[in-house]
Image: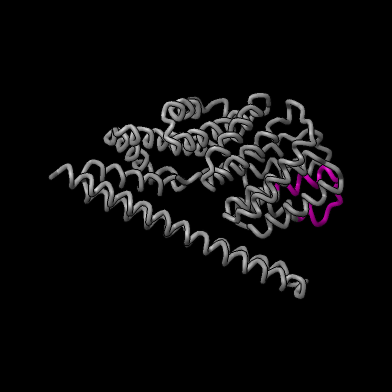
Amino acid sequence: MKYKLLAILFLLLFLDCFYAVDRDLITVEKIEKLAALNPELAYRQGIKINSDTKLDSKNKLRLLLLLTKISNETKRYSEALHLGNEGLELSVKSKKTLFELKFLGILGNIYQSLKVNDKTKYYLNRAEDLLKKTKLPASQQHIKGNILYLKGMNYAFTLDCNMALEYFDQSINAYKISDHPLTKINIKLAYLNKAFCLLEMNKLKDAEYYLNLSQINTYKNLKKSGIPESYIMIINQSVELGFAKLFSLKNNFQLSNERLLAILKVKNTTNISEIEADVYTQLSSNFLRLKNIEKSKFYQSLYRQKISQEDKNQIQILNKLLQQEKELSKDKIDRNSENAVYLFILLVCVFALISFILLKKLKKIKQQNKSIENEIYVIDN
């Protein structure tokens, strides 16, 4: 099971910089508003303001938070990490705990999306330790919920669903206390990924309950909070995938396929890339159970093509990150040459880990399919 929606998560979890009060400088306020309409232009203007304008610590942190988010969205990963760490250092120095929590969460989230698990744990563990020392008011409970949700996702990625469920429950409790507008969507993500964990554990009744909770039936109020409708659609498609898995586990393969094929029908008009590979592998498994070997092999081949492309994209992203790191290091060659070597070693390890996980998953699918084929052969004879 792949746990997706990180791109959406990054936007939703930290979009609350738009809701900041105390807007001391109109320049920062303009950049925040512009980011929702034209992120690229907002980035260029924000970088200029960050370089040329003397800001107080609070507005400097607001701007760095926004620039970190935009850098990540536009795949400037090295810059996102650089800006995020600059913001983290400033928040620690100026003793701005809420900003420190936000920057720790963003940095953990970036590394999680890049599949660098050690770095993910480092930043999220720091955030959790800081949470334990900080008493947040109800209006800031969404920050606590965001950190705990990311911790849950990290455990889900490493297939430790028992721990993931504990953190999802804690994040849900925090979201319920918060009155922040974005918690309406964040809690849906927590419900959804809790449901996927329960499916992995074959707790079907509980999984169905949380899948129902994660559905978004009305867009109006969420759109008022600044959530694009396309993100809401992706979440609902992931809910449909969850129900398809649920029906398959209940041996209702026809109904499962109906849900899956309905998702693929909107492929050309809606971005389903977050769940496309999972749709293919579930269809392959279902058709094998239905003794349709030809279609099973067809969707398995699509699945392999998709994950192969995803792995290539991941390698390209990490290579680009290394290249960006080199470009930013031109004025500090000696020190950063050493850093580049360490980063290169880290990237090699990440590539090896990705390859290992891919081969292990493909082997598992092959074994499952062989087992099902043997069962079908016995039944037919």
| Residue under the image location 57 percent in, 32 percent down | 185
| Residue under the image location 56 percent in, 45 percent down | 6
Q: Quadrant of the C terminus?
A: top left
The residue stretch that appears in magenta: 48-66
Residue lying at the far left of the rendered structure = 381
Please say whether residue 137 is visible from this viewpoint: yes
* Left or right relative to 290: residue 182: right
Does residue 97 belong to the magenta stretch? no
Q: Quadrant of residue 344?
A: bottom right
| Residue under the image location 63 percent in, 27 percent down | 173
From the top left corner, tell me how far across and down residue 362 is, in percent.
38, 56
Q: Nearer the viewer, residue 88 or 148?
A: 148
Relative to residue 16, is residue 349 depicted above or below? below
Please say whether residue 319 is visible from this viewpoint: no
Residue lying at the far bottom of the rendered structure = 334
From the top left corner, tell me how far across and down residue 269 is, in percent.
40, 43
* Left or right relative to 206: residue 153: right
* Left or right relative to 194: residue 291: left
Relative to residue 248, is residue 205 depicted above or below? above
Q: Quadrant of residue 258?
A: top left
Q: Quadrant of the N terminus?
A: top left
Provide the major secondary structure of the magenta segment.
helix
* Left or right relative to 218: residue 291: left
Q: How does the figure colour the protein chain or chains? A: one colour
Relative to residue 305, is residue 131 depicted above or below? above
Q: Nearer the viewer, residue 60 or 25?
A: 60
From the top left corner, tell me how far across and down residue 84 is, in percent.
72, 52
